[in-house]
Image: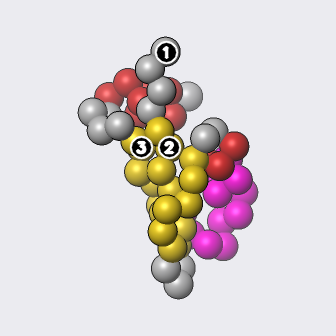
């Protein structure tokens, strides 16, 4: 539900997210919803989810 709301109000072409590396479950949810890891550092993954016009 949160992703649906974000896609409706975020003007950019992608939703930008950050998740701690020790939070594997949240990362998997992001990836399952079309996200991809575009960057990482020692403690976080940075994920983008493309907005799709439906």
- Distance between the alpha carbons at the discs numbered 3 and 1: 16 Å
Q: What residue appears at the point 48 percent right and 68 percent down from the top-left corner?
A: 39
Q: Quadrant of the N terminus?
A: top right
Q: Is residue 29 above or below residue 54?
A: below
Task: Point out residue 46 in the picture as x, y percentages from the top left corner.
Answer: 48, 63
Mark number displayed over residue 49: 2
Q: What residue appears at the point 49 percent right and 15 percent down from the top-left corner?
A: 54
Say whether residue 47 is left or right of residue 26: left
- Distance between the alpha carbons at the discs numbered 2 and 1: 15 Å
- Tell which residue pokes out farthest to the bottom in this image: 42
Q: What residue appears at the point 66 percent right and 73 percent down from the top-left corner?
A: 22
Count residues near mark 1 (Cα–Cα under 10 Å), then give few for <14, some for 14-19, many for 20+.
few
Chain-order first, disc 2 or disc 1: 2
Chain-order first, disc 2 or disc 3: 3
Q: Taking the image as drawn, is residue 22 in sight?
A: yes
Say whether residue 9 is left or right of residue 24: left
Count residues near mark 2 (Cα–Cα under 10 Å), then give few for <14, some for 14-19, many for 20+.
some
Magenta segment includes 39? no
Q: Magenta part of the protein: which range?
A: 19-29
Mark number displayed over residue 54: 1
Q: Taking the image as drawn, is residue 2 in sight?
A: no
Q: What residue appears at the point 49 percent right and 62 percent down from the top-left corner?
A: 38
Chain-order first, disc 3 or disc 1: 3
Magenta segment includes 23? yes
Circle 3 or circle 1, nearest the eye: 1
Quadrant of res 13: top left
Nearer to the camera, 2 or 32: 32
Quick check: marks 2 and 1 in contact, CB under 8 Å? no
Q: How is the image coloured?
A: secondary structure
- Distance between the alpha carbons at the discs numbered 2 and 3: 5 Å
Task: Point out residue 9 in the picture as x, y percentages from the top left corner.
Answer: 32, 28
């Amino acid at each position: 539900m949160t992703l649906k709301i974000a896609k409706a109000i975020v003007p950019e072409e992608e939703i930008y997210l950050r998740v701690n590396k020790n939070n594997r479950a949240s990362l998997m949810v992001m990836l399952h919803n079309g996200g991809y890891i575009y960057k990482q550092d020692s403690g976080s993954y940075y994920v983008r989810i493309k907005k799709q016009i439906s």
